[in-house]
Image: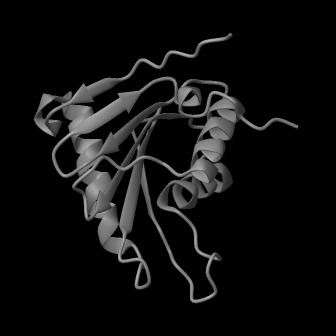
Amino acid sequence: MEKFILNYRRYASAAELAAADSELVARAKEACGSAYAPYSGFRVGAAARLRSGQILTGSNQESEVFPSGICAERSLLFHWQAHHADDPIETLAVASVPGERECYPCGGCRQVIVDTEKRQGAPMRVLMCSSTSVAEIAPARLLLPFTFEL
């Protein structure tokens, strides 16, 4: 039998984070405001700090022809790939409204996050936020230990 052990860090409060991470979490929470989620009522925001220090944001966008919408993480990561692929993502933060629990990426987003980490050739940290706490995992590939590969 094989065993997989996952180590991650949990912060009881975003106040425990380094200033740069605290700012990124705040930007992810702010990005929830641009979400279009009239059907689920679940607004998600994502923020990524690039190696250059630039911060990009994205939010989920729903469509009447479900499932044609897109999650916040993929919205942000596809924009990054199209416009900033030469500037690797160092940290990605994800938050939601309502935010009682930490916002963990869905399976599709986990695959795209792992693809992005592989494509950029550099590890990425992921901060998954609730209204108070934050879970951190690094590298991002730990979110999906059995990833799809062609």
Q: Is residue 122 above or below residue 94?
A: above
Q: Nearer the viewer, residue 18 or 136?
A: 136
Q: Nearer the viewer, residue 126 or 27?
A: 126
Q: Residue furthest bottom?
A: 64
In the rendered image, the quadrant that contains the N terminus is top right
Q: Is residue 117 above or below residue 44?
A: above
Image quarter of residue 38 = bottom left
Residue 17 in sight: yes
Compared across the picture, whether 9 is left or right of 107 comes to left
Q: Nearer the viewer, residue 84 or 78?
A: 78
Q: Could you tell me residue 93's position as x and y percent? A: 38, 44
> Going 65% across and 43% down the picture, which residue do you hit?
111
Q: How is the image coloured?
A: one colour
> Going 29% across and 45% down the picture, which residue do you hit?
129
Q: Residue furthest front?
A: 1
Q: Could you tell me residue 110's position as x and y percent? A: 58, 43
> Going 41% across and 54% down the picture, which residue do you hit?
46
In the rendered image, the quadrant that contains the C terminus is top right
Image quarter of residue 20 = top left
Q: Is residue 2 above or below residue 47?
A: above
Numbered disc total? 0
Residue 85 in sight: no
Compared across the picture, whether 17 is left or right of 108 comes to left
Q: Could you tell me residue 99's position as x and y percent? A: 25, 57
Q: Could you tell me residue 49's position as x and y percent? A: 41, 40
